[in-house]
Amino acid sequence: MPLPVRVLAPTAVTVAVAAAAALLAGCSRTPAEELEDWYSSGGESRIEKLNESAGRVNDVSMRTIDVQGPACQDLLKAVAAAEKLGPVPREAAQGYWKESLDGFRRGAEECVAGASKGGELQTSRGIVVVQTEGLRKLVSAVSMIRAGLSQK
């Protein structure tokens, strides 16, 4: 003998849940809006600080390690702040962003370690990593971010 199936009429709660779900689905954000939020809530300032700090490392690259070490320490602080921001909401830009932060971190750490030991060669190697990996990837990330922002 089959079991009886009972169909319940929608209650106020299920209607409210369905209405909320419909509203949320209708209010989804575009990728450009998500990128704009990331950029305006810290992305722009982190990019500027990274560029400024890495530029300073680049500027002191031909100076003595007593000047290079502090510049690399400042870059490490800028990297730490940028890492707290969260990922760029564009996959391709995020890849370059992560690679730039990794390059900056590796290079600045090597620079600081070299400067603390008086090792000019290690300090210089770190600066080269900042220049070739960090800065190059940051340029690519910023280019992709700007392209995404222009699609608004």
Image: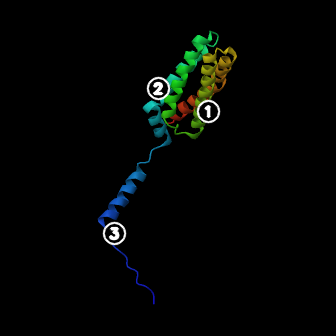
CB contact under 8 Å: marks 2 and 1: no
User: Which residue reaches farthest top?
Assistant: 63
> What element does badge 1 sit on?
helix
Query: At numbered mark 2, what does the secondary structure look like: helix, strand or loop?
Result: helix
**Residue position for label 3:** 10
Inspect this view and state whether residue 150 appears.
no
Q: Amino acid at mark 1?
A: Glu
The residue under the point 31% across, 67% down is: 11
Inspect the image, locate mark 2, and give the three-letter code of the amino acid beneath it. Answer: Ser
- 101 relative to 121 in the view: left or right: left
In the rendered image, the residue lying farthest to the right is 121
Q: Residue at x 58, y 35 (%)?
A: 93
> In the image, is residue 5 above or below residue 13?
below
Q: Which residue is mark 2?
A: 45
Split into 4 quadrants, where in the image is the N terminus? bottom left
Q: Earlier in the sequence, mark 2 or mark 3?
A: 3
* Mark earlier in primary sequence (1, 3): 3
- Residue 145: horizontal and vertical position, in percent? 54, 32
Which SS class for mark 3?
A: loop
Q: Which residue is mark 1?
A: 99
* Residue 92 in the image, given as x and y percentages of width and height: 60, 38
Q: Residues within 10 Å of mark 2 (few under 14, many from 20)?
A: few
Of residue 26 and residue 42, the one placed in the foreground of this image is: 42
Q: Residue furthest left?
A: 12
Name the residue nearer the viewer: 44 or 146.
Answer: 44
**Could you say which is closer to the camera, residue 96 or residue 110?**
110
